Image (cartoon, helix red, strand yellow):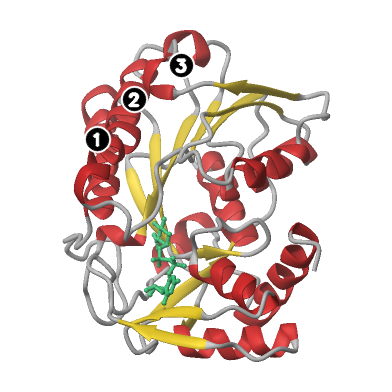
Amino acid sequence: MSGGPKVGTVLVTGCAGFVGSHLCERLLYAGEQVIGIDAFKPNYGRWVKERNLSFLRDHPNFTFLEQDLLNCDLHGLLQGVDVVYHQAALPGVRTSWGHQFVEYVDQNILVTQKLLDAAKDVSLQKIVYASSSSVYGGVTGPVDEEGPTRPISPYGVTKLSAEQLCQLYAYNFGVPVVSLRYFTVFGPRQRPDMAIHRFIYAVLHDVPITVYGNGEQTRDFTFVDDAVDANLTAAATSRWGTVFNIGGGCRASVNELIQLIEQYTGKRAIRQYVPEQPGDPKDTWADVRKARLQLGYTPKFDLEKGVYLQVQDMRLLYRC
Ligand code: UGA
């Protein structure tokens, strides 16, 4: 579904990020007025986010605000806004342990609560919240939205808490929010800390790939354009107070992924196997029947095409 809601003004939080920047581009293309906000967190790789923004900055319908949602005037920000796409978060499953957790709580839970609280006082068409497959934890086999949510990483706990806040603000105050549980999104502009980005970088630069565990763990990889489609249809649907799995249907193991990267870069990977990481689920597998039925969601990109496109983008990014 590539259309979009016909609305006037939208707010995209995390607009300089991977999914956020693609979403803004699509919204601008559809003629929307887009207000983008980003705090450049985590603060590594600012230049990568600046590059993401460069695709948007000059557009006459795009307004950029460099602000932290934790301490900005959210009531003011929501004035005149029809739809909020809440993509901003502190991402990363394996980095959410220890002293870093407090920032995950701030950026993922507190920010979402503040946004929802401000939203209850204004008239919005929709808030689309970017949730995560990490709410499911270590389940085996396909998962649907009714299945148990038992995160195994602190990050997953924060995404689930924020998702539950969305549900209770919908229930108590009628805030029209829909949550999308993304399954390992990939494609051009993927975050530098994520596996496919790290692997392509390593292969292009002839440095070793670090594989956690035996590399047989699988992910239901989701191409970024499909995640963007899901956001647009979630904004347009009359349904709210609900949750959808957004998986790409491209399940593959980390070892299979590395083979594909070798194929599309034409280079051999140097693999270094290290112990599996705490918080990392063995497998993820989305049952997307609900999204298909209720949002018309049909992923269009397979892993081969998506990895090919990501390799091309990374050759431009790193000039190699
Ligand atoms: C990703 C995102 O980073 C999360 O923000 C998001 O919420 C989550 O997807 C999701 O599905 O919701 P993850 O699946 O860990 O989390 O994504 P990657 O970082 O791309 O890792 C994929 C797999 O590659 C994992 O099994 C990981 O153990 C493995 N990996 C990653 C390595 O073997 N080596 C690395 O250097 C990085």
Q: Would you place residue 298 above or below residue 130 in this image?
A: below
Q: Is mark 2 within 8 Å of ligand 1?
A: no
> Who comes first in sequence, dot 3 or dot 1?
3
Residue 221, percent from left and from top: 50, 72
* Local crowd size for mark 3, using a 10 Å CA cut-off: few (<14), some (14–19), many (≥20): some
Quadrant containing the C terminus is: bottom right
Reading the image, the residue beneath label 3 is 123
Q: Residue at x 49, y 88 (%)?
A: 271
Place of residue 307 in the rendered image (x, y in percent of width and height, measured from the top left) = 66, 75
Disc 1 residue crowd, few under 14, some 14–19, many 20+, Cα 10 Å = some
Q: Dividing the image into four equal quarters, which quarter contains ligand 1?
A: bottom left
Work out whether residue 104 or residue 4 is closer to the camera in this orientation and state it.
104
Instruction: Name which residue type carries label 3.
Output: Ser
Give me the disc on residue 165. Answer: 1
Query: How far is disc 3 from disc 2 in space, using C-alphas?
Result: 12 Å
Q: Nearer the viewer, residue 260 or 30?
A: 260
Q: How many marks?
A: 3
Q: Is residue 181 visible?
A: yes
- Left or right placement of residue 284 versus residue 8 in this view: left
Element at label 1: helix
Which residue is tagged 2? 116
Amino acid type for the residue under numbered disc 2 = Leu
**Residue 42 pos. (x, y %):** 45, 41
- Considering only order in the chain, which callout, 2 or 3, is on the residue closer to the N terminus? 2
Dot 2 falls on a residue whose secondary structure is: helix
Q: Quadrant of the N terminus?
A: bottom right
Disc 3 versus disc 1: distance between alpha carbons? Answer: 18 Å
Q: Are marks 2 and 1 in contact (CB under 8 Å)?
A: yes
The amino acid type, in three-letter code, at marker 1 is Leu
